[in-house]
Amino acid sequence: MASTTSSIIVGITGASGAIYGVRLLQHLRAAGVHTHLVVSSAGWMNLEAEVAMSHAEIEALADVVHNPKDVGATIASGSFMTQGMVVAPCSMKTLASVAHGMADNLITRAADVVLKERRRLVLMVRETPFNLAHLRNMTAVTEMGGIIYPPLPQFYHRPQSIQELVDHTCARVLDLFSIDNSLAPRWPGLKTSLANAS
């Protein structure tokens, strides 16, 4: 498959919140965006625990699926053009590897490539509470140009389901890649009476 700037790499690692990766794949497909999927072994464990889909069903959501051990894959090279990468969810181990340039598997190598080529990298980090190492690693990635995006839910749109919460966060991630979507309502501003109440 030829490289294209309309491609986005999606990594799924071993943190709770595997549904974010799955929903992003679904929404990217609906938007006509070409996707490369890499799932770590711990990522598959969480998918099995949290998402009622088979491996084959999840892989079918992506255009290309890579083995995380295949550091010779297309996405491991800066010459392969993509729009960027999302790791959803991003474990603290993956965050640390990216922060320190370890490039020890295809997920962290692809993230390293995205950073060095000055493309968009979004890490949907999942852990709570954060310890100092987590915070320092997030700062390091931010200083390198990455975006730390903990999937924190918003409630102003009064969600009625878990899927609405997930999709609202996915909408904001798609916004970061300038991918048009209508997954969630935009903030309409406060009504005058509420705005003047303070």
Image (cartoon, rainbow, N blue to C red):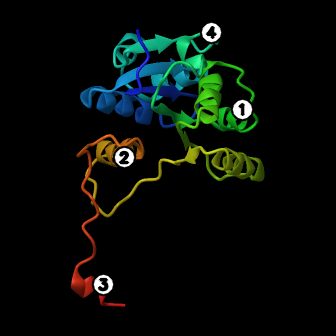
Pointer 1: what residue?
97
Pointer 3: what residue?
195
Q: Nearer the viewer, mark 1 or mark 4?
A: 4
Query: How far apart are the two marked residues, 3 and 2, measured between alpha carbons?
Result: 26 Å
Q: Residues within 10 Å of mark 4 (few under 14, many from 20)?
A: few
Q: Between disc 1 and disc 2, whose residue precedes?
A: 1
Q: Residues within 10 Å of mark 2 (few under 14, many from 20)?
A: few
Q: Residue 108 at x, y = what percent? A: 64, 26
Of residues 122 and 55, the one drawn nearer to the viewer in this rendering: 122
Q: Between disc 2 and disc 4, whose residue precedes?
A: 4
Query: How far apart are the two marked residues, 2 and 4, measured between alpha carbons?
Result: 30 Å
Labels 1 and 2 touching (C-beta < 8 A): no
Q: As drawn, is 134 to the left or to the right of 64? A: right
Disc 3 marks a residue whose amino acid type is: Ala
Question: SS of the residue at dot 1?
Answer: helix
Q: Residue 119 at x, y = what percent? A: 53, 36
Query: How far apart are the two marked residues, 3 and 4, measured between alpha carbons?
Result: 55 Å
Query: How far apart are the two marked residues, 1 and 4, measured between alpha carbons?
Result: 18 Å
Disc 1 marks a residue whose amino acid type is: Ser
Q: Between disc 3 and disc 4, whose residue precedes?
A: 4
Q: Between disc 3 and disc 1, whose residue precedes?
A: 1
Labels 3 and 4 touching (C-beta < 8 A): no
Pointer 4: what residue?
72
Q: As drawn, is 62 to the left or to the right of 93? A: left
Of residues 153 and 64, the one drawn nearer to the viewer in this rendering: 64
Question: SS of the residue at dot 3?
Answer: helix
Of residues 42 and 172, the one drawn nearer to the viewer in this rendering: 172
Q: Residues within 10 Å of mark 1 (few under 14, many from 20)?
A: many
Quarter of the rendering occupied by the N terminus? top left
| Residue at 70 percent of width and 24 percent of height | 103
Pointer 2: what residue?
175
